[in-house]
Amino acid sequence: MAEQLVQIMGRHRREALPERKPSWLKVKAPGGANYVRLKQMMQELDLHTVCQEAHCPNIGECWEHGTATFMILGDVCTRNCAYCAVSHGRPPKYDIEEPSRVGQAIAELNLRHAVITSGDRDDLPDFGAYIFAETIRQIHQRLPGCSIEVLVPDFQGNEDAIRTVLEARPDIYNHNTETVPRLFKKARPGGRYERVLEIFRIAKRIAPTIPTKTGIILGLGETNEEVVEVMKELRSVNVDILTLGQYLRPSDGHIELDRYVTPEEFRELYLVGMQLGFKHVESGPLVRSSYHAWEQVQAAGV
């Protein structure tokens, strides 16, 4: 592993960014049959997907492969992370019937793999855990063959909330780390790096057989050394799956882009991750938390 570490430590400081995005960040516009069908159903059932809310560049590819990330508990987050495109403010009252509608949509679309996520709901006593759990149960009931990944907020580290979700038996429990400890205060106010590690300790204690997963965004000002150190700490709490992707600034009001990480650097970080013992590492400029999620499920042995 030492050889890989030497190869990826070349860029630490910000360099002048090119006027245009690098060629490796260009994607085809979505528009396949499955994409159109899923988009229409989202509108008809008044559902949200993080694919749309967060401007994901892979929306066309994922939807065509029968994978979608549903955003429950409204489209407004109680926190204001500096990198995130999701709206922030006071969320509306949650819809108790939403889990049923999500289950209906997933069954009608006959999805292979569904990802359920939400913004932070610090305004709720259980931080939204019950709605997560009920959504999982609805999907299991309506389409038993569909694997389910939950991408949960931190629930402020509340063990009861984590337990509520895990007892509904998702196939993958995902909580994103997002960045390195040094940048947490700047990029993820309201979050705590140590809390992230504790969440995974709790999850493995409650449900040791459910694979855990996390993601890191690159290009916020971190160094490659810091990323590798975080990867090591995530393995120390037995995280199974890791995603690494490029930060793309949603607007001028978001945290400034520090650098474009090259495909070669992402490849070297992938190799380091696999040598550290992750069951699966998805690492590349266009990777987002749910990118190639159907392959991650297989790698995790679900």
Image (cartoon, rainbow, N blue to C red):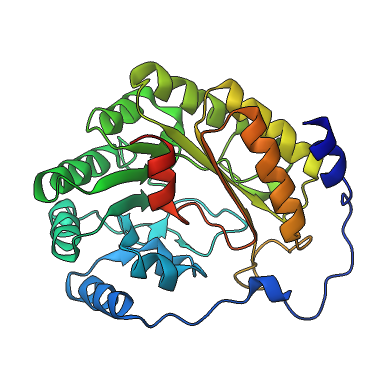
Residue 133, quarter of the rendered image: top left
- From the viewer's perspective, is residue 196 above or below residue 259? above
Residue 204 seen anywhere in this rendered image of the structure: yes
Q: Residue at x 18, y 75 (%)?
A: 44
Residue 199 or 126: which is nearer the viewer? Answer: 199
Drawn side of residue 143 relative to residue 154, left or right: left
Residue 37 or 45: which is nearer the viewer? Answer: 37
- Quarter of the rendering occupied by the C terminus: top left
Question: In the rendered picture of this protein, how many numbered marks are placed on residues?
Answer: 0
- From the viewer's perspective, is residue 18 above or below residue 210? below
Drawn side of residue 157 relative to residue 252, left or right: left
Drawn side of residue 114 relative to residue 251, left or right: left
Residue 167, quarter of the rendered image: top left
| Extreme residue toward the top, this view | 205
Q: Residue 104: percent from the left, percent from the top? A: 13, 59
Q: Residue at x 55, y 59 (%)?
A: 84
Q: Residue 39: percent from the left, percent from the top? A: 29, 75
| Extreme residue toward the left, this view | 141
Q: Residue 142: percent from the left, percent from the top? A: 10, 50
Residue 152 seen anywhere in this rendered image of the structure: no
- Quarter of the rendering occupied by the N terminus: top right
Q: Residue at x 49, y 70 (%)?
A: 55
Q: Residue 19: percent from the left, percent from the top? A: 80, 80
